[in-house]
Image (spheres, rainbow, N blue to C red):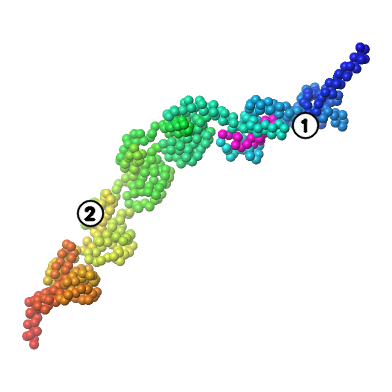
């Protein structure tokens, strides 16, 4: 074959090879020239191809290729209006990525990507191409704050792949579940009651914290977090915190685990009765106020109650906030302790001397005191003795004889009152006074003033079915039985006497101890008819005996 023929044959083979390039095919090309707008690339075709220079920009905007570089490009068109091939490096790169992703999807391999933005229903992830990550597939438990994952890199599993539509759906949760399953196998080997394990706080609720022990969660209840007082688990723990816990209970059937944290340290109540013996003076911090007292923290895990009645000897404390505030350091005395029930009773007033113990010496029984009426109740009046100490005059000790329905009939607040000390009860903090005791009991002299047989005037004060009550002296009443109202038979006392009638009566009997006097109108009438009378003429107890009556009668005859 001649040289010319050989050249033509080689040229034909070369042109045949260059014409074998197909559209939408990835081929290698050599950069021949770089201009302001394009890169000229030789792909072994009869004509060169051009690529927009922007496809070769780096992150800083500079061109990252040079003449002579070999690059993979996609043939978009074998010839344009200028006779040049239309090429794309970006599309070639993406097509290669799709092929790699397709291979990994088929093999079940994971892919790495960076979360770039929040989209409806989830997140957008850059894995070389854009893929969708549903919000429910980010973590083992759904999370509302997906924005915190943006710009972070993770491994994902492809759960949906459609190259034709360019659709890829990812899951991180699937990988976490696989990891969790493997961890769970190892954790279950060591999981038993009393085991001390390391965990990570996974979630916090009002009633406790869930701790990931490695593939399995355990509940650390708020009551098992601290021997002391906490109102919310977040006071001690935060999500993501590493924590050492002890297994309190483990149910292998439902895989429920109860954890403890405070149990890793000694119970402060052990030996508390020795540390807080009754009568010991101690100090603590006010941690809580309730209507009936305040709780004092003596040490972590041990609190005592100061009842409102133990806050002051003399002040009437309506609410503990009138005496102490949360956070105050207070001194107190141990009144009682029950370590089994984990209760300590404390007292503040016991720090100071009990003023009631001094009252017995200062105001012995029989002492006459003066004070102002501080309060009036249905059952009596309270009289101020000293600051914070009142004495009670019971309604029954206001008068010997007067019938008092309510103390307000005699007194009002602020009135000056004189009274006698009747009794002081230090233990119950009661001071008893009496007003009527300032004067002798009139009933004690009644048997002498009104001995049986005495005739006196009486005012009818009350009618009953069985008779009438009549007053023979100030506040002194006697009973005229229905059988003693008249010499005639009386079935209804109102037929014979009326209220406020003044009647002559005879004292039949008198019992000063029982405060009872029996009177009789009938007896007076009968004795009058017999001319056998003895009568009290006035309050001065002047009497008229039978002999006196005879003398008066004789005097009348002589004057006639």
Q: Is residue 411 above or below residue 283?
A: below
In front: 486, or 54? Answer: 486
Q: Position of residue 99 (x, y in %)?
A: 71, 27
The residue pinned by badge 2 equals 364
Magenta segment: does it hold 313?
Answer: no
Q: Position of residue 149 (x, y in %)?
A: 61, 35
Write down the region rendered in magenta: 123-140
Q: Quadrant of residue 3?
A: top right
- Judge the density around disc 2: few (<14), some (14-19), many (≥20) Cα neighbours within 10 Å: some
**Residue at image location 19% in from the left, 76% down from the top:** 503
Q: Nearer the viewer, mark 2 or mark 1?
A: 1
Q: Which residue is mark 1?
A: 54
Tag 1's secondary structure?
helix
Which quarter of the figure is the C terminus placed in? bottom left
Name the image quarter holding the N terminus: top right
Q: Residues within 10 Å of mark 1 (few under 14, many from 20)?
A: some
Question: Does 54 sit left or right of 180 as displayed?
Answer: right
Q: Is residue 376 visible?
A: yes
**Which residue is painted at 88% across and 19% down in the image?**
12
Q: Is there any visible trace of residue 544 in the rendered image?
A: no
- Report helix, strand or loop for mark 2: loop
The residue at 31%/64% (across/down) is 408
Front in this rendered view, residue 10 or 407:
10
């Amino acid at each position: 074959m001649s040289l010319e023929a050989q050249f033509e044959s080689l040229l034909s083979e070369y042109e045949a090879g260059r014409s074998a390039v197909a559209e939408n095919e990835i081929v290698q090309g050599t950069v021949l020239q770089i201009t302001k707008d394009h890169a000229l690339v030789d792909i072994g075709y009869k004509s060169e191809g051009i690529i927009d220079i922007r496809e070769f920009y780096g992150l800083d905007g500079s061109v990252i290729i040079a003449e002579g570089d070999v690059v993979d490009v996609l043939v978009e068109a074998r010839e344009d209006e200028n006779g040049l091939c239309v090429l794309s490096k970006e599309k070639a790169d993406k097509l290669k990525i799709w092929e790699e992703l397709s291979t990994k999807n088929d093999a079940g391999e994971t892919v790495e990507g960076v979360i770039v933005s929040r989209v409806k229903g989830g997140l957008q992830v850059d894995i070389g191409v854009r893929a969708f990550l549903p919000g429910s597939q980010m973590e083992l438990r759904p999370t509302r704050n997906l924005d915190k994952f943006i710009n972070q890199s993770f491994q994902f599993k492809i759960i949906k792949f459609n190259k034709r539509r360019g659709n890829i759906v990812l899951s991180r949760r699937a990988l976490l579940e696989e990891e969790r399953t493997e961890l769970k196998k190892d954790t279950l080997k060591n999981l038993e009651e009393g085991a001390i394990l390391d965990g990570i706080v996974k979630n916090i609720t009002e009633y406790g914290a869930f701790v990931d022990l490695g593939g399995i969660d355990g509940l650390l209840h708020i009551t098992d977090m601290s021997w002391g007082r906490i109102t919310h688990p977040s006071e001690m723990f935060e999500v993501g915190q590493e924590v050492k816990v002890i297994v309190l209970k483990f149910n292998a059937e439902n895989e429920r685990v109860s954890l403890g944290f405070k149990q890793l340290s000694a119970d402060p109540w052990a030996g508390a009765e020795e540390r807080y013996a009754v009568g010991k003076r101690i100090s603590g911090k006010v941690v809580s106020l309730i209507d009936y007292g305040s709780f004092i923290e003596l040490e972590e895990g041990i609190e005592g109650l100061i009842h409102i009645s133990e806050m002051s000897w003399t002040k009437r404390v309506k609410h503990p906030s009138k005496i102490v505030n949360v956070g105050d350091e207070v001194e107190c005395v141990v009144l009682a302790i029950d370590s089994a029930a984990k209760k300590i009773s404390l007292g503040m007033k016991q720090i100071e001397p009990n003023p009631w113990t001094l009252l017995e010496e200062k105001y012995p029984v029989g002492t006459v005191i003066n004070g102002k009426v501080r309060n009036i109740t249905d059952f009596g009046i309270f009289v101020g003795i000293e600051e914070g100490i009142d004495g009670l005059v019971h309604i029954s000790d206001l008068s010997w004889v007067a019938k008092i329905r309510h103390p307000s009939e005699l007194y009002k607040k602020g009135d000056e009152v004189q009274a006698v000390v009747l009794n002081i009860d230090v233990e119950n903090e009661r001071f008893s006074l009496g007003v009527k005791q300032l004067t002798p009991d009139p009933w004690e002299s009644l048997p002498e003033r009104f001995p049986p047989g005495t005739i006196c005037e009486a005012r009818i004060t009350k009618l009953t079915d069985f008779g009438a009550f009549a007053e023979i002296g100030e506040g002194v009443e006697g009973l005229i039985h229905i059988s003693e109202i008249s010499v005639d038979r009386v079935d209804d006392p109102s037929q014979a006497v009326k209220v406020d009638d003044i009647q002559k009566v005879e004292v039949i009997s008198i019992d000063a101890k029982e405060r009872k006097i029996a009177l009789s109108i009938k007896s007076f009438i009968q004795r009058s008819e017999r001319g056998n009378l003895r009568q009290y003429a006035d309050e001065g107890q002047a009497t008229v005996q039978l002999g006196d009556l005879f003398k008066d009668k004789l005097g009348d005859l002589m004057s006639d």
